[in-house]
Amino acid sequence: MLARHNKPGRVEVQPIEIYHPDMSEPRLEDVFKTSGVPTYTFVHPTEFTQLLVALRSPGRGVVIEGPSGIGKTTAIENALEEVGISKNVTKLSARKQSDVEYIQALPEISDVGAVVVDDFHKLNNETRSRLADYMKTLADEEVETVKLIILGINRAGENLISFANDLVNRIDIIPFEANPDEKVDSLIGQGEHALNIRLNVRQEIVREAKGSFYLAQMLAREVCMEASVLERRDSQGHSEVSLPAVRSRVWERLGLSFRQRCESFCTGTRLRKEGRAPYLHILNWLATSSEWTLSLRDAVRQHAELRGSVGQVVEKGYLSEIVEGDPQIRAVLHYDKASEQLTVEDPQFLFYIRNIPWRRFANDLGFISVEFENRYDFALSFAGPDRNLARQLFESLQDQEVEVFYDQNEQHRILAEDVEEYLRPIYQTEARFIVVLLGPEYPKRVWTKFESDAFRNRFSEGAVVPVWFADAPPGIFDETTRKGGFNYDPALPMENQVSRLTELLLRKLAEERSQSKQGG
């Protein structure tokens, strides 16, 4: 029997029917299951023994963390049965408002029995804090009539402890990682035995699943349907199926549900075709990761050429708004602002993004390029009195999701470095264009002299964009007048001029990238 909750303070136990399939004639949907608890293909995950011990320990809460489709729910169902406490279990999900109200009331309910709280990461901070305090009380008093089991994505345990640091020695945190290939292979083997068939792509499915029981079940089921295996064969059969063909069909079908979500995520609030496509790169990094969770902090460190554009959408909260503001995206992705981690919620969505042809996808969306030879698109060179203009230009360009070197934005990286050695390569080669703000003080400053010496030879390659100030002495920058530039008048409103200059710089960048793309 399974306990169903009505309202806080009362648990009503109702009998449910248990389906016992005819083991002699199992059907495909009973063998390779993509929903519910596996009947024929349950395989003990590596963490199963640890889970059993944790469930038998009086009072201690249990936190099971890991990505969707890794086998958490199936493992807990079987473990509860093995330890003999599956008769009176209340299952709650943070995705259901009625369940959330019940979760919030748990500390006031006595002798509630075993309670499974799924999707812990969907709860608000106040409710998480209440659960943390409640679990501490249960552990200290060694309450034997209540067992609280939390299910969540990666780092759910760490998140819970953040609300009560002294909880760390009072709960058992069991991380469910990707299952070893031999476990996935065993799952497929059990399904083959049940259906009396040998799958010719068994090892290919193992590799494609990448540790996910769910994906293994889904692909094995698709292969069987392709081979017209719908129930157990009287005599052993053998499939002759191409997994790439099956994978392609599955991907096309999933695209009906997921393509629009991917497009919405990758374009952000609006498409900036000249930009560095930060959202697209974030989703690509997640898709190509060996895990189901992407640490944006680590990713930004590994991709210096996208540090500014990706860093901006993270730091300014744009990424969080994209995920939380769209119910369709929120259903498949979870973003934790505190840890700056993006996690896949749906294993089918993970399969879909792992098989996206990224270059063609980016082109279809309208991005000019997603591969960049230069670390920066623009580097600003200016004298101190013109910092206000430089800052506004930097912010205007950065809002267009391009990479801009602006000294004040990189002070923390320059600390303890040899400043000349740090700056020289930026102006010599690492920035595609140098935007020089030629105010009256520019030729008088030491650092502008250093910077101009570094990029002087780049005039010939069309990489230097001069911005002439109307109040600079006549003739002081005659050598730059042979190149196209921008006239800036400090007496006129700065905002309109910055907007116009930004537009021209982006058009120049777009033209450059289009030519480079055609040449490639």
Image: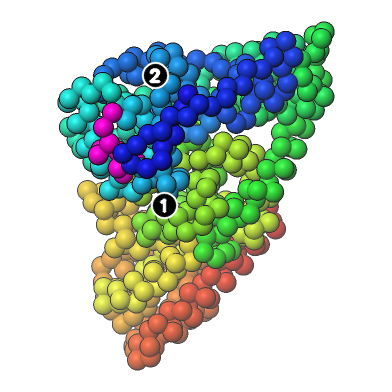
Callout 1 crowding tier (Cα within 10 Å): few <14, some 14–19, many ≥20: some
Seen from the viewer's position, the closer of residues 488 and 38 is 38
Q: Amino acid at mark 1?
A: Arg
The residue wearing badge 2 is: 85
Please count the marks in the image: 2
Q: Amino acid at mark 2?
A: Ile
The stretch of residues the image draws in magenta is: 103-111
The residue wearing badge 1 is: 307
Seen from the viewer's position, the closer of residues 172 and 498 is 172
Residue drawn at x 50%, y 50% as measured from the top left: 330
Q: Does residue 77 appear left or right of residue 384 in this picture?
A: right
Toward which corner of the image does residue 253 lie, by quadrant? top right
Q: Position of residue 150 (x, y in %)?
A: 36, 32
Do we see residue 90 in this rendering?
yes
Q: Does residue 414 appear left or right of residue 291 in this picture?
A: left
Q: Earlier in the sequence, mark 2 or mark 1?
A: 2
| Cα separation between marks 2 and 1 | 50 Å
Q: Position of residue 167 (x, y in %)?
A: 21, 31
Q: Position of residue 266 (x, y in %)?
A: 56, 55
Of circles 2 and 1, the one toward us is 2
Do we see residue 177 in this rendering?
no
Q: Hey, which residue is sitting farthest bottom in the picture?
A: 491
Residue drawn at x 29%, y 51% as measured from the top left: 413
